[in-house]
Amino acid sequence: MKKLSIIFSLAVLLAGCTNKPAAPKQAEWAKGADLSWLSEMEHDGMLFYSADSMSSTDHERASQDCITLLSEMGMNAVRLRVWVNHSTGWSNLPDMLGLAQRVAKEGLRLMVDIHYSDFFADPNHQTIPEAWHAYDYEAMLEAVRNHTLEVLTALKDAGVEPEWVQIGNETPNGMLWPMGKVSSDLSDAGNQQAWDRYAGFTAAGYKAAKEVFPDITVIVHVDNAYERRDWFWQAMKEHGGMWDMIGLSHYPMMSAWNGGKTWQEMNDLAETNIRRLISDWQCPVMVAEIGMFSGNPQSDTVMADFVRRATAIDSCAGIFYWEPECYGGWRPAEYIPLGWGSYDMGAFTDDGCPSSVLETLFASEK
């Protein structure tokens, strides 16, 4: 991807990647996982095992480092989120940095997902960090710039060079609400002003990232890989937003969230949309998140079908499974007071072994 960034670098001075030459084939397919919960799971005593350990004659199975275990299966990239100042400390900069150093030691590629929030940012939540609440727009721009610089400089000082960075997480409705909250109503004057602010945040993060790592690939990430959003990318372009790569989330078995579509429909729509985005915006697309229901017998089939489709697309850069290491009903500390249950799309078995869903992803070839 770094080569892609070099090829594209002269064209990103305007908006987005629309002036770039036709997106070339990717040199290496990313077979990744978001492992941001890993350090907290280890702190809570969760252990990880290879499938071979199940047949061990030892009295106790020997656990493995989760990153090493998945790397041996074929994983070649890891995605890590970073929050500004979460109350538990997990996924804040020091925690992310520790995991990133382990990823680098394993020789894996790294994607950094900057949420610009103290907790999860997504299409329904883009909460301004507590420390930034009193800022006006100019101060918020500076905060985005400084936080991006802080995160990436810390990695650089630690000898870790990320290949990709996300400026925001799942931002189809903007970020840093209400200041940067946008909608699809491009005829509304107030929304146009919000678009100026949101695109400004994205450009500030983009430029800061390039200051630290000139060759880094900058991603703007939205949810719903199956959903066509021409208005979003057109508005980003017109208001000065900047990006090198488009990131998408894809959860094809979530029929309750997608109007009752079958997983076959979801995979088909996602493939069509990825191809269209690559063609329309002349830049690569990364499936930055994917998830299947753990223990569901259809999950293997769903993953195999999507991997087959995605690997057939020249400028689809790869797939990252979101938090596959979850198993056994574990949940993070902040979920308990919120009354939230455990994540049900982990890709480890109840025995603490990687499931066949991960084997399908990490064994893929392109």
Image: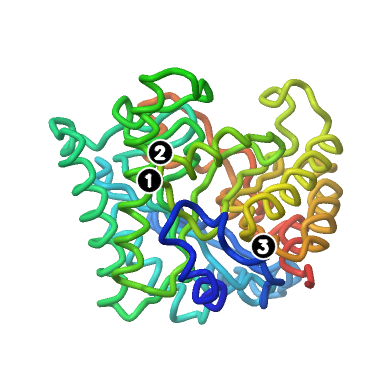
User: Residue 47 or 2: which is nearer the viewer?
Assistant: 2
Q: Which mark is residue 318?
A: 3
The quadrant in which residue 117 appears is: top left
- Which comes sooner in the sequence, label 2 or label 3? 2
Q: Residue at x 32, y 66 (%)?
A: 97
**Residue where numbered disc 2 is placed:** 120
* Quadrant occupied by the C terminus: bottom right
Viewed as shown, does residue 106 lie left or right of 23?
Answer: left
| Disc 2 and disc 1 in contact, CB within 8 angstroms | yes
From the viewer's perspective, is residue 109 above or below residue 165?
Answer: below
Which amino acid type is marked by label 3? Answer: Gly
Which amino acid type is marked by label 2? Answer: Phe
* Quadrant occupied by the N terminus: bottom right
Q: Residue at x 47, y 41 (%)?
A: 238
Categorize mark 1 by other alpha carbons within 10 Å: few (<14), some (14-19), many (20+).
Answer: many
Q: Residue at x 50, y 76 (%)?
A: 6
Residue 22 x, y percent position in the rendering: 68, 65
**Residue where numbered disc 1 is placed:** 115
Residue 215 x, y percent position in the rendering: 43, 74
From the viewer's perspective, is residue 247 above or below residue 267?
Answer: below
Categorize mark 2 by other alpha carbons within 10 Å: few (<14), some (14-19), many (20+).
Answer: some
Q: Is residue 8 visible?
A: yes
Residue 194 x, y percent position in the rendering: 35, 29
> Mark 1 and mark 3: span between their CA atoms?
21 Å
From the viewer's perspective, is residue 347 above or below residue 315?
Answer: above
> Mark 2 and mark 1: span between their CA atoms?
7 Å
Viewed as shown, does residue 167 lie left or right of 23?
Answer: left
